[in-house]
Amino acid sequence: MTYIKDFDQLGRGDLDEAGGKGANLGELARAGFPVPPGFVLTTAAYQDFVNANGIAGRILELAALPADASNDDYEAAAGHIRDLFAEGMLPEEIGSELRAAYLQLGQHMAATGEDSGADAGGEPRVAVRSSATAEDLASASFAGQQDTYLNVTGPDAVAAAVIDCWASLWNARAMAYRSRNRIDPSHLRLAVVIQEMVDADAAGVLFTADPATGRRDQAMISAAWGLGESVVSGAVTTDDIVVDSATGKVAQRRTADKDVMTVFTRSGTTEQPVPDEKRRQAVLDDDAAAALGRHGTAIANHFGVPQDIEWAQASGEFFILQARPITALPEPSAAAPREWPLPYPNGMYFRASIVEQLPDPLSPLFADMIDGAVVRSLNALLGEAFGKNVVRPGDVSLPTVNGYAYYYYSNSGMRRVMGQSLTAMRALARGKAHMGIEGWRDHSHPKYRGIVKSWAAKPPSDRPAPELLEGICALLDAGAAYYTAVQSIIPIAATSEIMLRSYYDKLVRRPGDPSAEVFLLGYDSEPIRAEKSLYDLAVWTRERPQLAAAVTEGTGAGIAEALRAGTPPPGNGAAAVEPEQWAEWRSRLQRHLDRYGHAVYNLDFVNPVPADDPSALLETLKYFVRGEGKDPHQRQQLSADRREDHARLVSERLGPRRRAVFRKLLRWAQQAAPVREDALADVGLAWPLMRRMLLELGERLTASGVIAVPADIFWLRLDELRNAIDFGLAAPGTAITGTDRPARADAVEQRKMLWRGQRKAAAPQLLPQSRWMERAFGSMMPARTLQQAGDVITGVGASSGQVSAPARLLHGPDDFGSMRPGEVLVARMTTPAWTPLFAMASGVVTDVGGPLSHSSIVAREYGIPAVLGTGVATQRVSSGQKIKVDGDAGTVTLDGSGVTEGGRAIDGNS
């Protein structure tokens, strides 16, 4: 049997035989890239070794560790497996082929003059490198998980290094890595690369895209003196160089003080000090860096994806030692902004009210449209509340600063409004301007529903483009007017709760009595009704085992795709689901979405709602189908019983006067709190229809060559959309010709890149940033200062209790599928659409919010601790990091020793 394959016999399709590293090196060598000569001992050799020694079954037994296995468990298993390999005998056929190939490599190197890698005895110095069948893949690099042995000389030493490489397939870090990535180890095999050692003057790593920002137009080079082992392991400081891929020129460089380098020894490598004259000298000049960048661009183009490349330089010549896809490469993003320039002088900027439901930078089209919609609704409301001529043109707007929305009030307008605050309070108390609970119930809510119903009367596909844009504007105006009206309910609910709590704490409460929040729990509200509806669907599903299996085996996104396709999701249980049963399940889910699917995760209409993409909602449904979580009907009933029992006990012991005041305040707060949640839950009534209209326009603009995909419509400016409609480009049968890319494709990509960079920033709550603004308005804002250092983050304790658990950082519905039961939900903010996640969470931490916010109310219903308004939690906390949430003290304590997710594995091989 042939166990040896030279590099020129291999290509990217030989993964099963050569492993990821070997297949990639073969592909590079055959394509003419400067790869040092070598060969691969194939996976068949590994398989025949374990079979000949009878250890295959025992390896899998030792590697079958539970999901909660500790590092010590993995180390113990790895030690036993390492002993099995050490005690094994190399079959003669494998040993003889390996020896012959090694000696032939030495002869080839001598014949071609490539003898720098030979020792004094003429035997070549080689690197013996692991190449697993599940490494260097686009989905998971497995970088550094198996072992490499450098500067190995002699057939016996090579054979010993090969066996050690085989054993490293089962080292502790490799087994733990596979477990985290849910890779079945039973089919894994390991090839071994034997390759000429390069006596490198310099070496390092080249990324053909920026792994931090995802930008594909920049190559990132790390360079150090000597061998590359110390670079990829992170043991030395490196020069860092940025090469512009388009121009091929160095765009940026940082030359480090390099004190250590890795060099050859007689039988291995060692570290030694860098000579003084080289410590601050650039490893690569601009010409060399540009030449290396060109190699990287050519390799990335050859493979078709950005590459993570290890390189070496000897006598001015570059060698490619390894190339693999960059895993988890983010979408391209610009740098995060550091300055916050104000668009209008002589005014104040606040991130509060409607802005709380806009935690991210705005998409361009929404930014252009929401400003006018909010200004019109505010002017109408404030004009009626404060009187004419109090709010004047230019006094109020909703501009963006670095993409983030802010309420802007001119200084003169703010003075006039503050001077009429008593007039506004009287208008609110009297229900003037359709404000307050009665105004919402009798006017604002019915009016909003009516506008949505009227525009839903005709399908978007039947409307001409100008009519679609008219409808989108009308619906957004209606939503903004509705939200403005809802803002008049929030102070009523807040005031009623504050007065109840104050009276209760000062004049009623005794030691041992519960907090005042108990009297507000157990009531129905729209988010709670939505949760109960979802739970009821889960119970119905659970009673049908085949259907339950089909639902729980798939991802939320997979189930959503199956819903669109009209077939059960793929999986072991899917084939057994009867078509009638699946149709009934779809019908029940659709009824739920028709009733509750308009709840917004984020008011920016670039974000889907459950009605048009239920993927995030289905993750919670799966949780309930598995029988996890509490029955919300029972939880609500227990809360209601407790509320009534405590209210009765307190009332019975009070005298007539205090009892009358207590009951009056109690009725007021109990009436207002659920209405606030009902009102907020329906803010998105227009959003499903508005998104359908926008995407209909997007379909037409895609067909005409304006944008690449329908969803790119959200990244157009309003004037661009209007111009496209005016020129007939949103009408059937029209198209832009003579270009190979959609007309606005580049602009859209640039805006997306800018948006991703802006999203990395923490937007200040107040602008301009000054001590005066912080003193005057800081206590009124829904988030604390961004300047919090140390291991304890302070916020507002909004739901009592303590919990220590891993954190789960969620930026939006795309991340909901990563939430695991028992984790602490960490987010910038939550809306009623986030409520289903509270069933899985052990605690809640947000950047924005207070004791009267949605997060607080729902957390108290669920009985989990909440700390809100931290301002910095999403900047300081990582998924997987263990944190302690103290809802009584209002603190979040970070565990610096916790394991976090999302880091890049560093390859120890070179």
Image (cartoon, rainbow, N blue to C red):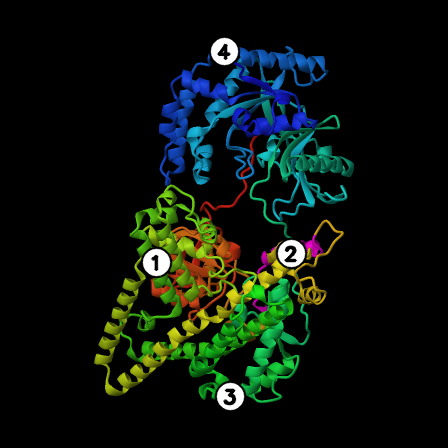
Marks 4 and 1, how far apart at CA: 62 Å
Label 2 Cα crowd, 10 Å radius (few <14 / some 14-19 / many 20+): many
Residue 168 among those drawn in magenta? no
Residue annotated with mark 2:
702
Residue 93 is labelled as 4
Residue annotated with mark 1:
537
Residue 694 makes an appearance in the image:
yes
Upstream in the sequence, badge 2 or badge 3?
3
Label 3 Cα crowd, 10 Å radius (few <14 / some 14-19 / many 20+): few
Upstream in the sequence, badge 4 or badge 3?
4
Marks 2 and 4, how far apart at CA: 61 Å
Query: Which residue type carries mark 1?
Result: Leu
Query: Which residue type carries mark 3?
Result: Leu
Upstream in the sequence, badge 3 or badge 1?
3
In magenta, the rendered stretch is 742-769
Upstream in the sequence, badge 4 or badge 1?
4
Q: Is residue 113 left or right of residue 349?
A: right
- Observer-side mark, 1 or 2, equals 2
